[in-house]
Amino acid sequence: MAAGCVFHRTLVRSQSRPESRPESRPDSGQNQSPVVCREQLVVLDVERYTRDQSSTLCFPQNIFHSPDLYDLTLFDGDCLLRVSLDPSLNRLVEKHILCHGSVIKSTTFRTSLALQLPECSTTQDTEPVPHTDSFSLVSLEVSGLHQDLDPGPLSWFGSSPGSDSHVGDAGVLPLRAKRSVFLSLWNNTDPHGNNWRRTTPTEQEEESDEEEQESLAPSVSVEDLKLRFSSFSGGTSQKLLIVRILQKSALMYYGRTEQNCACPFKAILEVCDGSGSVCVVLWNSVCLDWYLCLTPGDIISLRRFRVKPLYQGQRQDEIEISVNSRNPASQIRKLSESFVSPEHLPPEPTYSFCSSAELRHKPHGEICDVIGLVMFSGRSERIRSKDSQGAELFSEYRWLQLEDGSCNLPITVKLFATSQPEVHRQLLPMSVVVCTRLKLVRTLDQTQFYLTNTNYTQVYCTGFGHHSQMPYRRLNPVKCFLKWLRTQDDGQVLSRALIGGFFVFPHPPITMEAFMKSRRVAPSVLQGAELRRELDRLCYRERRSFCFQATVSAVTHCRRGQEDQCLSWSLTPPTPLATPLSSPLIGSTPRPDQSPRSVRSPSSCSSSPANQLRPRPLDHTPSRSVKRKLFQAPSPNKRSPFAALRPEPNHNSVVLFEASLEFLQESDDREEDSTSSSYITTCPTLSPIAMETLPVRFDPAQKDELAVAVTMGANMANTVHNFQFAFEDYYSLRLQVLSGLSLDVLFLPDSSPAPLRHSNSWAAILSHGAFSPHGPPPSPADLIATAAQLSNQRLLCVLEACHLGGAAVELVLIRAFILN
């Protein structure tokens, strides 16, 4: 630790004052005076975990805040310091304002009780730095974002010389709760951190049992366990059970603020032997050791497990096998098929593959497996829900569209997290994906459908070696798909491949009556104040739909990068000084002197209808500046109006061929309210459309950058100038919501075929969300010229809102119905 580092100057000096030294550890957090650090620090890591019963000792005045707690790793240019975030500041993380790389200043530290100290905190320094001290942040300012920060191995503040460490090293525990693992920032499903074991127990342990495994035969069967359970009350079994894993659930986190369990995880394996099937439940730290090591198709042996009645079972003989690290300590072994006697070899998993053509005729709720070529991979988003005990949680998902050649209709999948974060990050266009145990969901009118997760959904993707190891590669549906795949031209497929951007599915109905009937829960029509409150409540990448009444006061057509050259119509008459339109941020209520202006630019009249392919929303967070020279980040490049980097055709000639080859690897020899309006030529200043809103044409040469750009926590604006967008034209509407709220929202008419012919009037376009499929769409100039049709019309608006981080909220109008 350098003697002149910021932490040394700020924290050691405060600790050395006699009046600030704590007399006893439990009271130190209340006896210490806060210390303010005026210099800038960089956040290297943000880690999340949940409270437990003892956490109230650390934050006695914040017991009514969210159940989440956050620990931060700070860097001052010389060393690292782990601190916790006061729960009153949680919203900074939840809105993605405080994140990895954030530069903070005016930081107020307070000494706090640490329930678990980091291993690196032992000190041999002569400075009076009590190694039991830990700090929390009670206030701070975020002043910028540092780019490309990789400090490498560094010393921790207060550690002995030479005790270097990397951020995220194993052994670091939560500071304010007695938990043994951290959670993913954005969901409770994905394993996070280095405590999760990714390989089976050491080879030495396996070698010690090699002789036993050579002639391995089970001493009990699933049927025996069920019979014994029906006769007795279950209990612990010491006998050897050999089973094959048929299905594997996602991880389930059951941590609660009133519980003190250190590792509150469980996972369910559906297993079988020759006599039947049963559920095996992995509990707590067993999940850390075995969850990532086991996959469907593996053979395992179990000893010292507990037999219990199946949770929510319907029959008396339904049982589950509980595998825990204590009471008793269960024994698990992963076996090769060669170690199991042939007569006791469990059957292999079965699959039920459906093609896109077959899915059209399947009923709601059908469970099936699919294989396809990814043509569209959406950005990661989240929805808020409540668990069985009423606690709020976020579920992370993304949309996929797959093609399999059986019909022109793509397979649309709403894929939630399956505890496979590495796989989900690589679900890119031009990849072959197998999704098992999906459920078919139909709309109430039965006209549209998509697939989504069950508890046992697993995903296998090109690039991980999955396909060559799974038994499904020998099935006829998979062979038929591979035969079609090899006939495809890479260039033609690549021209249709998109990634990221705004996406809505199923498409809403085109009449207000059908829309109301289509909602499984009747939509609440919000007033302006209610809508503002709900929009303010959104967290990062949270997606929600809203219904409200409004009138249109302005319509603008823009092109990305040319927001100063727009076509615009406004209800209010022009004034000598043109006032810029407000940014499409939430809660933008214009003052009387901020009436919208109408604008026309000759250059914008030449926009081609070919650029109006799909909807895209508007909103962007202003770039932040970093002032401290030590952490000075390079200034972002100005966005190019047209990013047109197409991949060279010869670079992609073998992409699909290589994707299909993976199925052959490691295989055996078997086959494989104003009446006046205006239309003038003054250019308003509009906020640029958010980069996360625009779908990007997939380029294999940029797949790593694209994969990062659409995941949670991405800062897409830093790299977006290298991407080629599928379209760049968009419309912005200013809506006057009842009760006085004014919103600038995007309207993105989809040029894909609509179900019905219509007149291409504004009323028809807004209700269909698309131009008429019969004939060319109207030009932007014609639409803006006829926008007066909307004056004095009261509309029922359907809005999709997604928080993009910071102050940016994407607002997209997907339907608007005129109220008579």
Image (cartoon, helix red, strand yellow):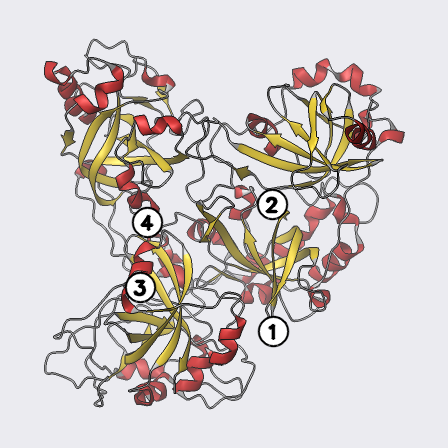
SS for callout 4 = loop
| Left or right of residue 337, residue 65 in this image | left
Q: Nearer the viewer, mark 3 or mark 1?
A: 3
Upstream in sequence: badge 1 or badge 4: 4
**Based on the displayed image, in which of its 4 quarters is residue 324 positioned?**
top right
Whether the residues at callouts 3 and 4 have beta carbons within 8 Å, the answer is: no
Picture disc at residue 809: none
Q: Residues within 10 Å of mark 3 (few under 14, many from 20)?
A: some
In this rendering, is residue 127 above or below 105? above
Question: What residue type is disc 3 on?
Answer: Glu
Q: Is label 3 or label 2 in front?
A: 3
74 on left or right of 308: left
The amino acid type of the residue labelled 2 equals: Gly
* Location of residue 469 by image quarter: top right
Residue beneath the point at 26% across and 36% down: 42
Q: Is any atom of residue 157 visible in this view?
A: yes
Depth check, mark 2 against mark 4: the one in front is 4
From the image, tell me which residue sits under label 4. Answer: 95
What residue is at 32 percent from the left and 64 percent from the top? 531
